[in-house]
Image (cartoon, rainbow, N blue to C red):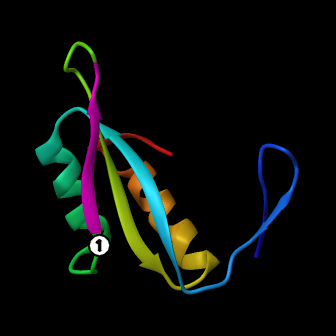
Amino acid sequence: MEILNDRDEKLILEYPCSWSYKLIAGEKEALEQAIRDVIDERSHKLTHSKNSKGGKYVSMNLDLLVHNEDDRNFIYEALKAHQNIKMVL
């Protein structure tokens, strides 16, 4: 799989590989529920990134093993579509 980065250089991914998603939600508990809904019992690591200045949003990093491009994209789209998630990066 080739992905272009900001400098139009190709990034080659070899699957399976570890992948990180940055998730932004209104509250930590809602974000955790979204992750349970999307990836169920799948092994993952969730770490706090930061809270917005006003405390309205929380961002967390989700790290897990993705098996192929379809798997990686499916998780991204499912998280992005979840009602508890404001943004996925």
Which is nearer the eye, 52 or 76? 52
Where is residue 78 shown, x and y percent of the image?
Answer: 42, 60
Q: Amino acid at mark 1?
A: His
Q: Which residues are magenta?
A: 45-52
Does the stretch in magenta take in 4?
A: no
| In the depicted structure, whether residue 81 falls above or below residue 87 | below
Where is residue 61 shown, x and y percent of the image?
Answer: 35, 52
Q: Residue at x 67, y 83 (%)?
A: 14
**Side (left or right) of 89 relative to 9:** left
Which is nearer the eye, 74 or 49? 49
Q: Residue furthest right?
A: 8
Magenta residues, dominant SS class: strand
Where is residue 21 shown, x and y percent of the image?
Answer: 44, 55
| In the depicted structure, whether residue 40 falls above or below residue 50 | below
Q: Residue at x 49, y 60 (%)?
A: 76
- Give the quadrant of the N terminus: bottom right
**Side (left or right) of 71 relative to 24:** right
| In the depicted structure, whether residue 49 falls above or below residue 43 | above
Q: Is residue 58 visible?
A: no
- Residue with the mark numbered 1: 44
Q: Quadrant of residue 10?
A: bottom right
Which is nearer the eye, 77 or 48? 48
